[in-house]
Image (spheres, grey):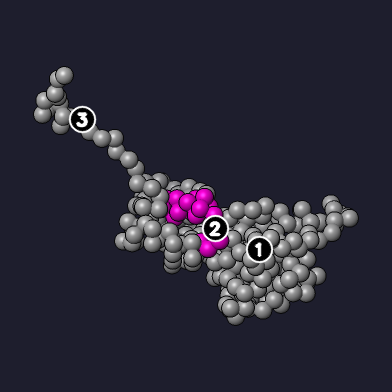
Amino acid sequence: MTTPNKETALAVKKPETKPSALNMMAARMSVEPAKLFETLKATVFKNATNEELLALTVVANEYDLNPFLKEIYAFPAKGGGITPIVSVDGWNKMLIRQPDFDGIEFAFTDDEAGNVHSCTATIYTKTRSRPMIITEYFAECQRNTDNWKNMPRRMLRNRTLCQASRMAFGFSGIKHEDEALDIEATVTSAETSPKALPNAAPPAVVPPAEGKTPQAELETLLVTAGFTYDQLAKWGETQGVIPDASSFGSFSELPTDVCRRLLRAQTGLLKGLETTTKA
């Protein structure tokens, strides 16, 4: 039997393994991966499956966003699962951190009554001869919330910032808060329209075999956070997240699938309720 010489032994290297997404985030935050996993599962990504948590972590790493600063959070997707949502602070952080970014300007136009009509963002880059110019219109973006009623220019500017940033630098796989609600409302409306389903009855509430029902879990979560069922119903119907919310009288009457979707992304739920009911 031959023994490899020293030079041959030194030449043999073990294959390099890439760090996991969780380890990468843990390194960014200077915490232990196991502790980070436990904390994410208990707080900002609570009720997410391990696979959903991994997907959110990958997106957060891709754009260097901090979930604990509410730069990215989870939102319940119609049909199950969760969608990564980036707050306006997160979009702004991604924009100004781009090496090619060279400034942004906003310009508003008003209608004849003096109400805001549109907002145009002009993003300058160092390596392009022409800027990226994106216009968003109030009529297409507005939502029936207190923030849009009380701060229409700020809300439209935020929406324009996100869209312009996406177009200028190709940010993909993420959505702005209002975008997620728009998509959710569109899908919900299409699936629950009386014309499409004339004989459809509300989904029955079927409690799990053991433990609390999703309705009870949702009630505990929101009551503990200081919200009432009426506030949830008003928010849910306004945003299109809970179809026919006014037809249900309490947490216990809510459809099980709706409760589960909201519980899977409770950070987004609480943020939405806080924004619209306590603005």
Per the image, label 1 sits on a secondary structure element best described as: loop
Per the image, label 3 sits on a secondary structure element best described as: loop
> Residue 238, position in %: x, y?
71, 69
> Label 2 vs label 3: CA separation?
42 Å
> Residue 15, position in %: x, y?
29, 35
Q: Quick check: can you spot residue 168?
A: no
- The three-letter amino acid code for the residue at tag 2 is Ala
Q: Which residue is mark 2?
A: 48
Q: Which residue is mark 1?
A: 210
Residue 148 in the magenta stretch? The answer is no
In the orientation shown, which residue stands out farthest toward the front?
1
| Disc nearer the start of the sequence (2/3) | 3
| Disc nearer the start of the sequence (3/1) | 3
Q: Which residue is mark 3?
A: 12
Q: Nearer the viewer, residue 131 or 198?
A: 198
| Location of residue 241 (image quadrant) | bottom right
Left/right of residue 112 with respect to residue 133 in the rendered view: right
Per the image, label 2 sits on a secondary structure element best described as: loop
- The three-letter amino acid code for the residue at tag 3 is Val
Q: Is residue 231 above or below residue 53?
A: below
At 51% from the left edge and 53% from the top edge, which residue is drawn? 50
At 61% from the left edge and 59% from the top edge, which residue is drawn? 76
Q: Are marks 3 and 1 in contact (CB under 8 Å)?
A: no
Q: Residues within 10 Å of mark 1 (few under 14, many from 20)?
A: few
